[in-house]
Amino acid sequence: MKLAIRGGLVVDPANDVNEVGDVYVAGGRLVEPAGAGEFTAELELDAAGRIVCPGLVDLSARLREPGQEHKATIASETRAAAASGVTTLCCPPATQPVTDPAAVVELLPPRTARAGMARVETLGALTHELGGKRLAEMGALKSAGCLGVSNAGRPIRDLGVLLRAMEYATTFDLTVFLHPSDPWLCGDGQAHAGAVATRLGLPGIPETAETVAVARDLLLAEQTGARVHFCRLSTGRALDMVREARNRGLPVSADVAAHQLHLTEEDLLGFNSECHLDPPLRSKQDREALRAGLADGTLDAVCSDHQPHERDARLNPFAATEPGISGLETLVPLTMKLVEEGIVELPRAIAALTSRPAGILGLDRGSLSPGSPADICIIDPTGKHTLDAEKMFSRGRNSPFLNTEFAACVTETVLNGRIVFPFS
C-alpha cells in the first residue's frame, strides 16, 4: 500500500529532522520521492498539528508468554503496544521456561507473527536458567536471534561468574544488560530507605544497593571490555557514575522507566500497592537527577518497564503484592508530559523512545530514513484523555496513573507500512 502522511511535525532525531513535512510509504518501506507531486497515495493521513516520528522501541516489556498467560499474552500485550505507538518490544529472558536454550526463542516468532501488532525481540539468559552459577550458551542464543544477554534482575552472587560472563559475551559481540542491585543490601526491602518507608514501617532498600552494584559492574566492564547497558536506573548517584564512566570512554549506556521520572517515594503514602516497584520509587532529589540525566543525554532511553499483573496480584497487603506497573499505555503520555513541562526538549524525548534504544539493541530501526521499514508513530500532543482501567488494551490494569488525565495520546501506529492502530 502507498501511504502519505501529510502536514505533521516530523521529528526524526536519527536524521536531525524537526520540521513540518510529509512522510511517504510504499512497499512497507519509507520512500523519498523526487517531488511530492510524483507520489500517488492509495491512502492519505492528515497529520496537521500532530507529531510524526519513528515507531517507538521499548527496551523492556514483559509479555508473560510463555509461562504466565494468566497475567497476559503476546496477543494482548502487542495489541497494547500498537495502541501506544510501540512497534518494537524487547523482552527480558524471565519467561517460563527461561530464554535459554535457544529453542525457547524459536517459540516467539510464530506467535508474534500471528498477533501481527508489533515486532518482538528477545534477550537471552546470561547464566543457565538465570541461576547465576554457570554461563548460558551465548553463541547459540545469538544465532537464534537474541540481541543481548541479561540475568533479568536475578542476582549473580559469585563475581567470578559475572566476570566470565562479561568476557564470554564480548567474544560474541553481545551487550550485557544489567539490573544493578546488590541482593545483600536489598535484603527483604520493599521501599526506598527514607522517611516514607520509616513512617510506613516498611523495610528499606538503600541507595547503596544500586550504587555499589553500578561501581562493581563498571570495574568489571572496564577490565573485560564488555559493552554494558544499565537497566532501570533509579538514583542520581548511580547516574553520576555512569556519566563519569562514559566521559572516560567506557562503552556503557543506561535507561530509566518512565514512571521513575514522575513518581517518588511519597506516592507510597497510604500503602499504595500500585507504587510497589522494583527498583523502588526514590526521593525527589533522585527524580530530579534522573530528569536532568535524560535532558543531557546521560540516560539514553526511556522504557515502559511493562509488567502486567492479574487483579489478584494487587489485592494483598503492600508487602505481599507483586511489584511492577502496566506501563505500555502511559509511555508516550508520561514522556510528552516532560516536554510539556519544559524538562526535556521534544527531539531528545523522541530520541529516547526511538533511535537511541534501537542503537542499544543494534537494530536498524528508530528512524524515518528512506529505505527503512515503515514503522511510524503519530502523536497528538493535545489529545487529552484519562487512563481508564476499563479501556486499557493490556490485560494488566495495574498502574498508579489510573484516572489520571494526560495531555497527549497516540492516534495512529504504522508497522511495516500497515496501519495497525486504530484497530480495524
Image (spheres, helix red, strand yellow):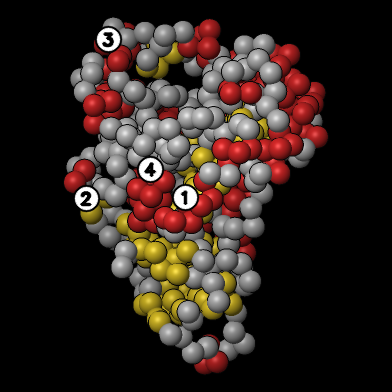
Secondary element at image label 2: helix
Residue appearing at x 29%, y 61% in the figure: 382
Q: Between tags 4 and 2, which lies in front? A: 4
CB within 8 Å, label 1 to label 4: no
Disc 3/disc 4 C-alpha distance (Å): 38 Å
Q: Crowding at label 1, few (<14), some or many (≥20) Cα neighbours within 10 Å?
A: some
Residue appearing at x 23%, y 18% in the figure: 316
Disc 1/disc 2 C-alpha distance (Å): 24 Å
Q: Earlier in the sequence, mark 1 or mark 3?
A: 1
Of all residues shown, which one is farthest toward the bottom? 37
Q: Earlier in the sequence, mark 1 or mark 4?
A: 4
Q: Crowding at label 3, few (<14), some or many (≥20) Cα neighbours within 10 Å?
A: few
Disc 1/disc 4 C-alpha distance (Å): 10 Å
Name the residue that disc number 1 marks: 111
Q: Which sits in the foreground, 304 or 247?
A: 304
Secondary element at image label 3: helix
- The amino acid beneath tag 3 is Arg
Residue 73: which disc?
4
